[in-house]
Amino acid sequence: MMPRNMSVAVAAIFFAATAALAQAETQSSDAPSSLSETYDDWTVACVGQGEKRRCAFTQRQIQKDGQRVLAIELTPSDDGGLRGSLVLPFGLDLKKGATFSIDDLPPGKPSHFQTCLPVGCILPLIFTEETTKALRASERLKIGTYASDAQKEVPFSVSLKGFAAALDRTIVLTQ
């Protein structure tokens, strides 16, 4: 698991990157100071300049009224896996955490929320190389949570359409 400060920092960078992409300033360098590309349901975003560039791929789900349902940000790790953060809305049973399953496979052990910020409640994510390979070849990442008041299951689903292309592009941009 990521240390608490690192997860909070990752989440803060994730949301700051969106603002940076929207307000990117033109600089005199050949390389862009920011980049945003869409691969089906995933967005690859880079911010920074030169070696200080940070790239990640994300998916956000927004309701019709504009309220965010979830946000997931992932970056490739040196071991062939992925690291990142998942932001879910308030009102979930934080003690029960969240379970993850790929397509119709049974869920694994629950992951625990690290903290809640004004943007929502954050779960640090660490996917092994094996899990990353499974995500590449699958259609859905299912997230199981429970409502804190009614104790009813609150499922979330993350489309993996475009996941492999977004991951591959992120790897290229960070090399």
Image (tube, rainbow, N blue to C red):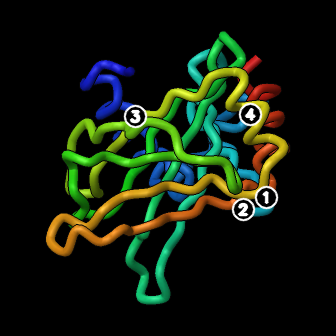
How many labels, in total? 4
Please tell me whether mark 2 or mark 3 is closer to you in this view. 3
Amino acid on which the number 3 mark rests in the picture? Pro
Q: Secondary structure at mark 3?
A: strand
What's the CA distance linking mark 3 and mark 4?
19 Å
What's the CA distance linking mark 3 and mark 1?
22 Å
Residue at screen point 73% across, 54% down: 160
Label 2 CA crowd tier, 10 Å (few <14, some 14–19, many 20+): some
Q: Which residue is mark 4?
A: 170
Q: Which residue is mark 2?
A: 41
Please report whichever mark, 3 or 1, sits nearer to the chain's N-terminal start. 3
> Which is more toward the observer, 32 or 134?
134
> Which is more toward the observer, 137 or 109?
109
Q: Hey, which quadrant is residue 113 in on the image?
A: top left
Q: Hey, which quadrant is residue 118 in on the image?
A: bottom left
Q: Which residue is mark 3?
A: 124
Q: Which residue is mark 1?
A: 161
Amino acid on which the number 1 mark rests in the picture? Lys
Please report whichever mark, 2 or 1, sits nearer to the chain's N-terminal start. 2
Residue at screen point 58% across, 28% down: 127
Spot the residue most to the front.
106
> Which is more toward the observer, 46 or 88?
88
Amino acid on which the number 2 mark rests in the picture? Asp
Please report whichever mark, 3 or 4, sits nearer to the chain's N-terminal start. 3
